[in-house]
């Protein structure tokens, strides 16, 4: 009985060690010609969205916002130009996001600079 328990424990540890080593090897390999696209809802934190993704130091990772009510696509690696390998819905989401960025940039450039407060209202 004791021997059987040792064998089962040893097998479980070996399987866990093997799985851990495989994950380390997979994440150690940087992908210089690919980028990982991870989708998140606009109100979701980037760190939270990246928790389920597996990537290595030096990999290109894009965390894009998903504005649609449908479920988020799974993180996926894309070669060179991600838009060429994305489905129509993913492509539409990227276009919407880049339009929002351009509009925000235009608005920030067109705003007049805020003048400093008068000397009597400056702090410290």
Image (cartoon, helix red, strand yellow):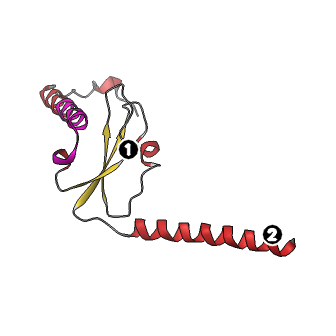
Residue 94 lies within the magenta run: yes
User: Tag 2 or tag 1, which sits nearer the N-term?
Assistant: 2
The residue range painted magenta reads 84-100
Asked if residue 86 lies left or right of residue 50, the reply is: left
- Nearer to the camera, 38 or 110: 38
Provide the major secondary structure of the magenta segment: helix
The residue beneath circle 1 is 74
Q: Position of residue 27 (x, y in %)?
A: 41, 65
Q: Quadrant of residue 93?
A: top left
Q: What is the crowding at mark 2: few (fewer than 14 residues within 10 Å), some, or many (at least 20)?
A: few
Structural distance between the alpha carbons of marks 1 and 2: 39 Å
- Nearer to the camera, 109 or 81: 81
Q: Quadrant of residue 12?
A: bottom right
Helix, strand or loop under label 2 = helix
The residue beneath circle 2 is 5
Q: Position of residue 52 (x, y in %)?
A: 46, 49
Asked if residue 50 lies left or right of residue 59, the reply is: right
Please identify, in this view, whether the residue under mark 1 or under mark 2 is nearer the observer: 2
Q: Position of residue 70 (x, y in %)?
A: 36, 28
């Amino acid at each position: 009985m004791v021997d059987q328990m040792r064998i089962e424990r040893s097998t479980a540890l070996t399987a866990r060690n093997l799985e851990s080593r495989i994950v380390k090897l997979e994440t150690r390999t940087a992908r210089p010609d690919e980028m990982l696209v991870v989708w998140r809802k606009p109100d979701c934190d980037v760190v939270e969205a990246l928790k389920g993704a597996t990537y290595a130091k030096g990999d290109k990772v894009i965390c894009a916002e998903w504005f649609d009510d449908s479920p988020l696509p799974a993180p996926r690696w894309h070669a060179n130009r991600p838009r060429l390998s994305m489905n129509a819905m993913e492509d539409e989401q990227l276009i919407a996001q880049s339009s929002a960025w351009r509009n925000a940039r235009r608005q920030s450039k067109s705003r007049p600079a805020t003048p400093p407060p008068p000397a009597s209202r400056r702090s410290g």
